[in-house]
Amino acid sequence: MLERSPQGLLLPALTTAHSHAFQRGMRGKAQRRHASTSDDFWTWRGQMYRAASALDPDTIYAVSKVAFDELARAGVDTVGEFHYVHHAPDGTPYANRTELAERVVDAALAAGLRISLLRTAYFRGGPGRPPEPGQRRFCDTDVDQVLSDVERLRALYKHNPRVRVGLAPHSVRAVPPDLLVPLARYAELHGLPLHMHVSEQAREVEECVAETGKRPAELLADLGVLSSRFVAVHATQLEPHEARLLGEARAFACVCATTERDLGDGLPNLGAMRDAGVRLCTGIDSHVVTDPFDDLRSLETHERLRTRARVTFVPEGKTPAEQLWYEAAWNGALASGFDGPGSRIVIDPSHPTLALVDDDVLLDGIVFGGHPGLVTGFAPST
């Protein structure tokens, strides 16, 4: 996996399989609270809605370009963009309904990335609740509008090998059960990636049980939504039996460690997911920090925190470092609809971070002690 060359150390480029690029504009703006108030995911979400409401086609391109440039410098060559800012702030579609999606794709390509544009479906504010004002520009009135946009985007990019188009029901909060089925059927019919926030928050699970009598992954399994193209984003509150449902379908779970830490989401049971055969990958999500090295090693270090143990898994035929890099590079690309990494990155072997690291544990040193500053660029294509 790790190769030496005259340019430096070569490794497969990384994928961040879950991104909301516009949230890069929030960096540093949601890290304070008044002493008399509490702060959690739900209060942060209000600030995120205000940031989303200020976007127009030019600013969503500009913010996305900053986010994607930073990913490229950090060793990422592929992004799965979970795109849900579709319309004007009052919910009125643009004359070109997919204008904002196209501007995000333009930004990724300009930054040199491959992109899987995951057109998100959003219909409600929660079970029995209409969309909140801050959600209106995310929402459509029916499935046909969503699928019409997906058809347009697929036609627009069908000859571009650097672009994939997928579907993303936002969550069980935002998409009622009867609308999940036609979205999943369309994705299956056309072989598209199908991504969805799953069990990120305890309240999401509680509301799903109250509405359907089932936890989110149980509901998705019963509806036939789970498959080898399905990506459960976060999966933070997953129970072991739900992990088995994902594993039986050969589904992915995309863990977004830096964002989950920032939002106080909790620690997913990664051991249960590994034991169940769930394919793990990583995502940057909110762009609170751009460090794909941290994202990938957290698939092990966060499990150490949860279990109060060290070296929590022993992969067959690989070292833990090799497995973690494989998950962030290959699994991430597969989850995003690509066949594998699109390029290789160059690591500077003379960087002070790698001083005193023995050759036989060099990848271990990169994975568990590395950072984007090690990356000098992408290797030329051969």
Image (cartoon, rainbow, N blue to C red):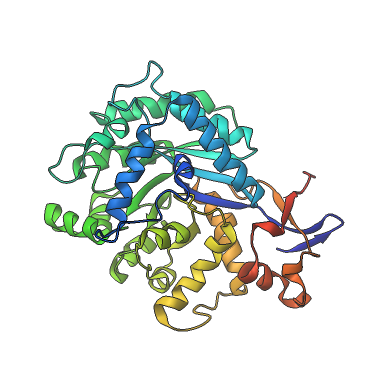
Q: Is residue 195 above or below residue 297?
A: above
Vertical arrangement, residue 103 with respect to residue 374, above or below = above
Name the quadrant of the C terminus. top right
Q: Is residue 215 visible?
A: no
In-image side of 365 versus 100 (left or right): right
Q: Left or right? Give the position of 341 relative to 202.
A: right
Residue at horizontal 77%, vertical 49%? 379
Quarter of the image with the N terminus is: bottom right
Q: Viewed as shown, does residue 163 lie left or right of 193?
A: right
Give the residue at the far top of this rendering: 95
Q: Residue at x 26, y 42 (%)?
A: 180
Foreground residue, 327 or 359? 359
Q: Position of residue 251 (x, y in %)?
A: 41, 56
Q: Residue at coordinates 69% horizontally, 47% vertically from top-left?
A: 343
Residue displayed at 52% across by 61% down: 295
Mark yes or no: residue 156 visible: yes
Question: Quick check: 197 above or below 202?
Answer: above
Picture layout, residue 180 above or below residue 201: above
The quarter of the displayed image where residue 52 is located = top left
Coordinates of residue 269 in the picture (x, y in percent): 37, 71
Q: Closest to the observer: 156 or 6?
A: 6
